[in-house]
Amino acid sequence: MMLLSQPGIWLLVSLFLCSSVNSISLWKSHPLVAGSNEPDQKRPDTPSSPRPLGITGAALLNYFEQNLRTMEVPDTAGVPQDSAYYTALTHYLGLCGARSENCDPGQSAVAKLTRDVPVLTRVHSHNDYWRRVPLLQALAYGVASVEADVWLENNGTTLLVGHNRVFLEPAHDLGRLYIEPITRMLQEVNCKSENKGDPYGIFYNAPEEQLLLYIDFKSLDRKLTYKLLLDYLKPLIDNNFISYYDMDAKRFVSRPVTVVLTGNYPSDEEIGVPSPRRYTFLDAPLGRLSSVGDEFTANNVSVVASSSLLELMLRCGKASNPSLTEQTAWESYGCLVEYVREAHRRDLRARIWGLPDWPVSTRENLWDMLTDMGVDYLNVDDLDAVSKF
């Protein structure tokens, strides 16, 4: 346990840029690696594969938070960075600098971050980019759906992530915060894969699970935003990591990442129906599904339908924020089930956002009720709380 008691020494060894200290993997070969039955061997640490600590998930995040002040964080002069915490964690996971040529899924970022972490398939990380470590914090909790609000910047050449335009930062580029780390993590776990047509996903214990990546369009020029987004998604497309609808074969092809457009996204009429493959899917209006006909057909146009709790309650003719107790839950909110059923009749998953966070008892009663209704994604801010729910 010496590594855990002396974080400064550990980080000097495992995070210092381009160090090459020999180490032995703390874990056996990953079950994802087909035919991997070689005995454990010594392998050199590289800038992109520091020795695993042996803790993952929320425990790993807590370790970094508690020991950050005593860690020697690598100097990344000239490289945009979000915080010392973000820099230290991404260096430990091997997500900065040039990708190592070594193929070792057992020491990949996926293994270091999500090993033994249960996947929360019904949770959506609301405003994920506001977290101290965007994307990685959600993955550490096993959350299978995240969102990034994007704005056109630099004369329409860049997509920056943030809720309000005034607080945008150059370091918060969509590629840097989301596309690049996702691509890199998937490349690491698929480096030995013989079946390139069915790549492994981003969760160690559940490689078959998808990650939903919501892209919330904020800028007025949605056509240019869409065009630029396709350029950003190219690494995922080129590596066969992104789900798509094959227009010729008329079938949905599932991959580790499915991209959902929400907010001010353009319609197919504005940009033309994607052909021969659709790589982005439209967030259907959960509250208006019964009136939109076949505009949001499952799998070839949409995979999820979303609406705010407030919108649905107003459509139900209810007060915008009725009191909620175990006794009054179904009386107040029971009408929501019809919207969920309509989505499921269309083979769409349902997401309801804008849930109250306080008081905690109300929030958790609502989580219970929505889960019982069959809502597929709970829109959540407190990942620690929902992981214990």
Image (cartoon, rainbow, N blue to C red):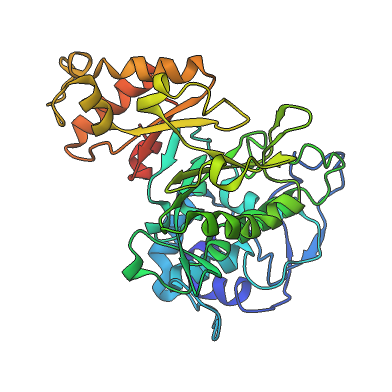
Locate residue 184: give its quadrant: bottom right
Please name the residue shown 67% across and 33% down the image.
Answer: 208
Q: Quadrant of residue 3?
A: bottom right
Q: Position of residue 140 (x, y in %)?
A: 50, 48
As rendered, which of 157 and 108 lies closer to the eye? 157
Vertically, is 6 above or below 375? below
Q: In this view of the protein, which residue sits in the foreground, 249 or 64?
A: 249
Q: Is residue 108 visible?
A: no
Residue 241, visible in the rendered structure: yes
| Position in image of residue 136 (x %, y %) | 51, 54
* 267 relative to 49 in the view: left or right: left
257 or 381: nearer the eye?
257
Instruction: Answer above or below: position of 180 versus 96.
Output: above
**Residue at the image point whose x is 45% and y is 44% from the top:** 262
The quarter in which the C terminus is drawn is: top left
Expressed as whole percent of the image width and height from the top left, the position of residue 385 reads: 33, 40
Query: Split into 4 quadrants, where in the image is the N terminus?
Result: bottom right
Left or right: residue 253 versus residue 151 is right
Q: Is residue 313 above or below residue 63?
A: above
Left of 360 or right of it: where is 304? right
